Amino acid sequence: MPGNRQPTVRSGNEPCSAPAMGPAGGGAWAHSRAALDRLEKLLRCSRCNNILREPVCLGGCEHIFCSNCVSDCIGTECPVCYTPAWIQDVKINRQLNSMIQLCSKLRNLLHDSKLSGVKACLRRKVCEQEEKYEIPEGPQRSRLNREQLLPKLFDGCYFYFGGTFKHHPKDNLIKLVTAGGGQILSRKPKPDSDVTQTINTVAYHARPDSDQRFCTQYIIYENLSNYHPERVRQGKVWMAPSSWFIDCVMSFELLPLDS
């Protein structure tokens, strides 16, 4: 390059400086939190008014609900505007679900709480210990379980998936079972079968005071579909909705099933 002229940088390509950290509650962080608050108001269920969980559109109107909030409305009508809600019109809004998950991560980064690990690192200009800021409950239990070399979440459990799965794709559920140490059944288990009764495994992650720890085989169905199997809860074979299965994964625990 001729001479000692320094290369110029176009203003549009100049690196952005990090947000001013300032006092707690002030500066760019406060503006970001306020913007996130406004966004989250648009991501609330039309029925329970909480942040949407597994958002579902009934098809005939623009209202969006948590999947569990409208499981009793499929095939009837929207609980808000009473537009007919046909089973074939029910749709899962996966893009909105991804946005909600992203907002949750942003909330952890921006909020003035023990979860704001990135903020602590920026303030102290050193790498903080991650465990001090990790999300509690499920993620924390999962990490401790792995570090202590304890059985995986679904260790000793067998799963049969019955009916059609649209809200939670069957392939994804099978991957979760496998990752959690569980086994997939190709045939529906029968409570009175000799083969069923000879399985003597115990569900390690079920609550110790629950008879669920002796349940080793689950019949999983999707409670948002038109498939409504006969209820099974006998001995080692229990029936459970796919939403329960997802909740177990999120909390890293075999949660109690409603009687």
Image (cartoon, grey):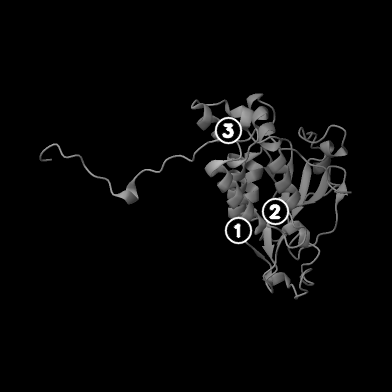
Q: Is 156 in front, or is 24?
A: 24
Residue 20 lies, in percent from the top left, at 49, 38
**Which residue is depicted at the point 66% across and 39% down?**
180
Query: Where residue 51 is drawn, which disc sits there?
Result: 2
Q: Give residue 228's mark.
A: none
Q: Farthest left residue?
A: 2
The residues bearing labels 2 and 3 have C-alpha atoms spaced at a distance of: 23 Å
- The CA span between labels 1 and 3 is 26 Å
Q: Of helix, strand and loop, which one carries label 2?
A: loop
Residue under label 1: 96
Q: Name the quarter where the N terminus is drawn.
A: top left
65 and 209: which one is in front? 65
Per the model, the C-alpha gap separating discs 2 and 1 is 11 Å
Image point (27%, 46%), residue name: 9
Q: Nearer the viewer, residue 119 or 250?
A: 119
Residue 165 visible in rendering: no
Instruction: Write down the residue under mark 3.
Output: 117
As shown in the figure, which amino acid type bears the numbered disc 3? Gly
* Label whose residue precedes the other's in the sequence (1 or 3): 1
- Residue type of the residue flagged with mark 2: Ile
Image location (x, y in percent) of residue 7: 21, 42
Q: Is residue 98 above or below residue 216?
A: below
In the image, taking residue 27 as reference, residue 42 lies left or right, namely right
Q: Nearer the viewer, mark 1 or mark 3?
A: 3
**Measuring 64% from the left and 51% from the top, which residue is drawn there?**
37
Would residue 231 be visible to someone looking at this image? yes
Please tell me which of labels 2 and 1 falls first in the chain. Answer: 2
Q: Residue furthest top?
A: 148
User: Which residue is at 42% across, 40% downward?
Assistant: 17
